[in-house]
Amino acid sequence: MKQRIFMYLFVFSILLVLFQYVNAKRVFEDMDNKLGVCKSQLETYKDSVKVLQNDFLEVSHFNLDRNEDAISYFEDEGYKVDELIPYIKDELYKLNEVKGEHPIIPYGASEGRKMMINTVKLLNHKWIIADFSDGEYWGEIFLTYEITKGSELKFNLVEYFLYPFD
């Protein structure tokens, strides 16, 4: 009787070990497959990041923050660029608060509204591009700017357009 119990225990333990081996092998293969998928996704993501970095560099080419010559121009004039860029943008946004029609935007607004500058991008030490809208109509303007000897900021409208309304 003792022999049979040991025999059953032995067979049971062999079956248990066999079950554990098959299960562990299946889990290992599943994890290996997931690792392979993750590695391929990682390569895809790395390629996507490289494409996005190239796109970013291309898009930010005309940007005062990345234009060393324009930054050097302001530094040579004695300005702190970190303070000057927000100042220029703020001065342009302050023109939105002027009573009546906007002093730079050459279009009138629709009834009960006012044309306002929404987004400003400083291209270099002389040029700005901005978009404007009154909530119904919108367009873009191209400006030049200069800082006079008296530290006064002057904007000059060069080009503008209004998108057609459908």
Image (spheres, rainbow, N blue to C red):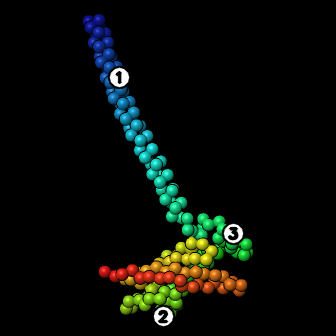
Q: Quadrant of the N terminus?
A: top left
Quadrant where the C terminus sits is bottom left
Residue for point 72% across, 75% down: 77
Q: Amino acid at mark 1?
A: Tyr
Q: Nearer the viewer, residue 23 or 50?
A: 50
Whether residue 123 appears in this view of the structure is: yes
Q: Which residue is disc 1 drawn over?
A: 21
List x then y, in percent, for residue 133.
43, 82
Task: Say whether marks 3 and 1 touch (CB < 8 Å).
Answer: no
Query: Nearest the camera: 19 or 68?
Result: 68
Q: Which mark is residue 100?
A: 2
What is the CA distance from the residue labelled 1 to the residue labelled 2?
82 Å
Furthest residue toward front? 159
Can you tell which of label 3 and label 2 is closer to the viewer?
Answer: 3
Residue at the spot 47% in from the left edge and 92% down from the top edge = 101
Question: Identity of the amino acid at label 2?
Answer: Gly
